[in-house]
Image (tube, grey):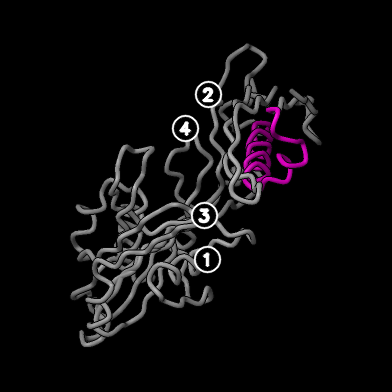
Amino acid sequence: MATFILPDSEPEVPVNLTSNLSQDQLLSFPAFKQWIETLKHSLSTQNKQSHTFYSSPYKLRKIDIQSVDFFSGKRLGFVKLRAEVSNDNGERLPGSVFLRGGSVGMMVSNDHLTNIWVAANDFQQLIMQPDDVPERTENEKQVILALQPRIAAGSLSMAELPAGMLDDSGSFSGGAAKEIAEETGLEIPASDLINMTELAIPDASSDSDERLQQAVYPSPGGCDEFIPIFLWQKRVPRGQLKQWQGKLTDLREHGEKITLMLCPLDQVWKHGGRDGKVLAGWALYQALRQEGRI
């Protein structure tokens, strides 16, 4: 098992690797880079007297890489690690971390109009509305949900936002648009997406603020995943909506079978309520509409 010192760490932080992971692979992994830079900055904010931990600041002492998973082509996909973060009094913070990076989620609704909420691993929530319904109404809007196996949850048919990993360019909106095109045939220009989480969540206003993503963190107690949620709207023919109902998409490359279903927008919180991305997208959409911001 190899060990190296994390670059630019103070105090020096030893990183213990697994036998199948190199230093270069870890340091070039986007999820690790994002996580370590975010953590280091958050720790640096403790030097402000107003910070809760100012009198006894916490420091990153060590990182143990416990396991890694590679995707096809030997691309690093997931990293499980334990970070030792403690103060000089010996008090520790929980440090079990599952790194997988950001994702994107979307919501699409039909009135013959399509609204899509996107969240970062790419999760797309699509809201569609028939185009024979009066514009600027919420009538007959439908959300596209994906029913797919999720073994980690013990389910073979979990209702959630259509999902896929971030593409190699690290683009959330681009990755979301690509996933939607693959699963529904819809071509969605990234420039047409509205980032609802960016509208709702203010960015860090100063260096003393933590530099978290303008996104939803579904499991911050143990995973770095963050989900920006985008909105896309498009009016579509009523007949097209019927064709999409029950459509099966076979993603052989990733071993997934995904059935798409249309769910009334006002019922999506019931049918997709086990998926936090659905609830986040629905809440952001309703709140931003109420404030007249979308």
**Residue 41 lies in the magenta stretch:** yes
Number of the front mark, 1 or 4: 1
- Residue 228 seen in this snapshot: no
- Distance from label 2 to label 4 (Cα)? 8 Å
| Amino acid type, callout 1 | Ser
Q: Which mark is residue 165?
A: 3
| Amino acid type, callout 4 | Gly
Residue that carries the numbered disc 1 in the rendered image: 173
Residue that carries the numbered disc 2 in the rendered image: 94
Labelled pair 2, 4 in contact (Cβ < 8 Å): yes
- Callout 4 secondary element: loop
Q: Is residue 190 above or below residue 57?
A: below
Number of the front mark, 2 or 3: 3
- Callout 3 secondary element: loop
Asked whether 294 or 291 is in front, the reply is 294
Instruction: Specify few, some or many for label 1: CA neighbours under 10 Å numbering under 14, 14-19, or 20 or more.
Output: many
